[in-house]
Image (spheres, helix red, strand yellow):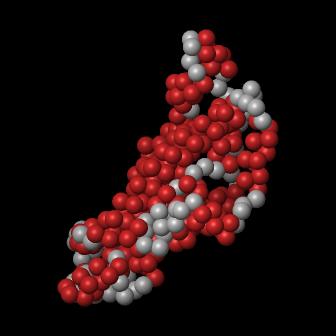
C-alpha cells in the first residue's frame, strides 16, 4: 500500500530530525579527531576547523614522548587486562556455582547477591574497608572493590541455567570434577556470555576515574582518565608538570591539541576492541537474559 501524504510527511520529518540529532551528536567527536591531527600553524590561525590542511602526528608524538602519559596509559591497560580477567574468573565461577541446584545455601546466597543490586553500601563504608585492607594508594584498590557485580552474576547464571545438565553428568561419569566441568565444558560453551560481560568489565576498568580519585594519592599512579581530567580542567598544563615544562621551553604545540589527542588515545582502544566481540555481544546478552 502506498503511504499517503501525511505518512510521507511524517517519515520525512523523522529523517530530518534523526539526521540533525546524529550530526549534533557526532560533530564534537569529529572535531576532537580533526584538531588532534592538524598542524600548530593551522590551529594558531583560529576559526572553525572542519578538515586538516595537512595531516600530522605531531600532537601524538609530543604526547607519547612524555613519561607521565605513557605511564598512565600503561596503568589503564593493566587495569583493563588484569581487572577484566580477575572479574571474569570470579563472576563466572560464582555464577556457575549458583546455577547448580545442589549447592548448599544456594537460595540464601542468591538473596544476598540480589541485595547488592538493590542497596549500595555508600562511599564512606567502602573507603573504610579499602583503608583497613591496606589498599590505599595501591592499584589493586581499583580492582578488588569492583571485582564482580550482582547484575553480571545473575546474567551469567541465566546463561549457565540453559546449559544441558546431561553434559555435566557425562563429564562426571568420565571422572571430571566440578572445577574440571567448569573449565572444560561450561567456559567453552559460554564464550558469547563471557565476551559480552568481559566487554562491560573492560570498558569499566578502562574508564576508572572516581575510585582512582578516592584511593590513589600518588599522581604517578593515576590512570589515564584521571590524567585526562586534569589536562582538561587545568588549561595551564598539558600532561602534568613534565609537559608543561616542555611547552614553556618550545612554545610550539598548543595544549588544546594535546588534549584532543589524549581524548582520542583514551577512546580509540575500546572502539577497536568492540568489532572483534560484536558477533558474540548481542547473543551473549540475550542468552543470559532468557530462560527457555
Tell me which residue sits at (64%, 46%) in the image. 152
Pick the quarter of the image with the C terminus: top right
| Residue 115 falls left or right of residue 151 | right
The image shows residue 79 at horizontal and vertical percentages of: 45, 56
Q: Considering depth in this image, is 9 or 125 the residue closer to the camera?
A: 125
Q: Is residue 241 above or below residue 127?
A: below
Tell me which residue sits at (78%, 36%) in the image. 105
Q: Is residue 69 above or below residue 176?
A: below
| Residue 23 falls left or right of residue 33 | right
Pick the quarter of the image with the N terminus: top right
Q: Which image quadrant is residue 220 in?
A: bottom left
| Residue 272 falls left or right of residue 51 | right
In this orientation, does residue 47 appear?
no
Q: Considering depth in this image, is 267 or 55 the residue closer to the camera?
A: 267
The image shows residue 263 at horizontal and vertical percentages of: 40, 69
Residue found at the far left of this picture:
250
Q: Considering depth in this image, is 38 or 196 the residue closer to the camera?
A: 196
Total numbered labels: 0
Q: Is residue 131 above or below residue 107?
A: below
Tell me which residue sits at (37%, 66%) in the image. 72
Q: Is residue 248 above or below residue 183?
A: below
Q: Considering depth in this image, is 159 or 280 the residue closer to the camera?
A: 159
Q: Which image quadrant is residue 230 in?
A: bottom left
The image shows residue 90 at horizontal and vertical percentages of: 58, 42
In this orientation, does residue 176 appear?
yes
Tell me which residue sits at (54%, 47%) in the image. 87
Q: Which image quadrant is residue 128 in?
A: bottom right
Amino acid at each position: 500500500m502506498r503511504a499517503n501524504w501525511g505518512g510521507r510527511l511524517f517519515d520525512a520529518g523523522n529523517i530530518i530530525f534523526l539526521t540533525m540529532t546524529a550530526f549534533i551528536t557526532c560533530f564534537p567527536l569529529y572535531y576532537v579527531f580533526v584538531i588532534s591531527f592538524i598542524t600548530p600553524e593551522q590551529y594558531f590561525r583560529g576559526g572553525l576547523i572542519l578538515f586538516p590542511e595537512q595531516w600530522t602526528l605531531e600532537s601524538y608524538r609530543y604526547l607519547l614522548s612524555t613519561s607521565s602519559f605513557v605511564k598512565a596509559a600503561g596503568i589503564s591497560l593493566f587495569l583493563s587486562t588484569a581487572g577484566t580477567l580477575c572479574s571474569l574468573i570470579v563472576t563466572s565461577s560464582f555464577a556457575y556455582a549458583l546455577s547448580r541446584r545442589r549447592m548448599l545455601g544456594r537460595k540464601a546466597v542468591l538473596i544476598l547477591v540480589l541485595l547488592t543490586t538493590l542497596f549500595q553500601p555508600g562511599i564512606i563504608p567502602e573507603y573504610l574497608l579499602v583503608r583497613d585492607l591496606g589498599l590505599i594508594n595501591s592499584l589493586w584498590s581499583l580492582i578488588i572493590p569492583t571485582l564482580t557485580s550482582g547484575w553480571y552474576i545473575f546474567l551469567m547464571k541465566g546463561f549457565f541455567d540453559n546449559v544441558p545438565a546431561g553434559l555435566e553428568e557425562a563429564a562426571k561419569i568420565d571422572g571430571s570434577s566440578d572445577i574440571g566441568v567448569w573449565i572444560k565444558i561450561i567456559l567453552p560453551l559460554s564464550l558469547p556470555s563471557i565476551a559480552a560481560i568481559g566487554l562491560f568489565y573492560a570498558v569499566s576498568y578502562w574508564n576508572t576515574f572516581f575510585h582512582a580519585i578516592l584511593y590513589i594519592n600518588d599522581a604517578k599512579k593515576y590512570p589515564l582518565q584521571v590524567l585526562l581530567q586534569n589536562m582538561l580542567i587545568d588549561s595551564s598544563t598539558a600532561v602534568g608538570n613534565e609537559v608543561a615544562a616542555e611547552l614553556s621551553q618550545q612554545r610550539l604545540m598548543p595544549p588544546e591539541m594535546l588534549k584532543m589527542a589524549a581524548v582520542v588515545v583514551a577512546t580509540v582502544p575500546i572502539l577497536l576492541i568492540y568489532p572483534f566481540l560484536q558477533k558474540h555481544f548481542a547473543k551473549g546478552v540475550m542468552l543470559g537474559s532468557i530462560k527457555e
